Image: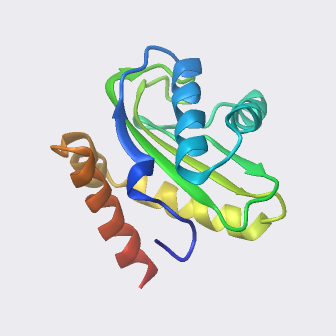
Amino acid sequence: MTALFTLMPEAVGTISADSKPAIIEHLSGRFARVYALDEEQVRERIEEREKLGSTGFGRGVAIPHARMPDLVRPVAVVLRLESPVGFESADDMPVDIVFGLLSPEQAGAVHLHALAAISRMMRDDKMHAALIEAPSDEALYALLANVLDRDAA
């Protein structure tokens, strides 16, 4: 979908979760279903990364990420939360958008470029508001696709 990572329409959705572990559970399951990955391995990798420090980006956004063996290119999942949830963010704000990224184990620069692109997009307050207010998961995906395609051009 973008030069930096794949984001499939099925990888974007709205969920109900009441805790950081529940969010990671949903995220792992979505990665597993959409990209045919091992759910337990995804969860373990994301949890390992979270032990190094929360990926709560701030401003209502979390960007959980990890590296996985056997991936050819980075893949993403975007979850909008029905209600904000604490994610141990640096600014202590609960998150309402979770943008997960998994990259190949040896994808050093590619992983960092993808994280930077996600970070730039999520720092835009208007974009964040548009994602929260999108009337459906399809509209949420369309917003993301438009921004990612535009930024890749």
The percent coordinates of residue 68 (x first, y second) are 77, 51
Report whether 62 appears left or right of 85.
Answer: right
Q: From the viewer's side, name the closer residue of 113 and 40.
A: 40
Q: Classify residue 97 by image quadrant.
A: top left
Report whether 41 appears left or right of 127.
Answer: right
Determine the residue positioned at 67% across, 67% down.
Answer: 73
Where is 100 relative to 14, above or below?
below
The percent coordinates of residue 44 (x first, y second) are 76, 31
Residue ranking furthest to the bottom: 153
Image quarter hosting the C terminus? bottom left
State the scheme by which the image is colored: rainbow
Where is 46 relative to 35, above or below?
above
Q: From the viewer's side, name the closer residue of 125 and 8.
A: 8
Determine the residue positioned at 72% across, 67% down.
Answer: 72
Determine the residue positioned at 82% across, 54% down.
Answer: 69
The percent coordinates of residue 2 (x first, y second) are 49, 73
Where is 37 relative to 90, above or below?
below
The percent coordinates of residue 18 (x first, y second) are 44, 14
Q: Classify residue 42 by image quadrant.
A: top right
Where is 139 relative to 46, above or below?
below
Asked if one can make out residue 52 in the rendered structure from this viewpoint, the answer is yes
Q: From the viewer's side, name the closer residue of 37 and 18.
A: 37
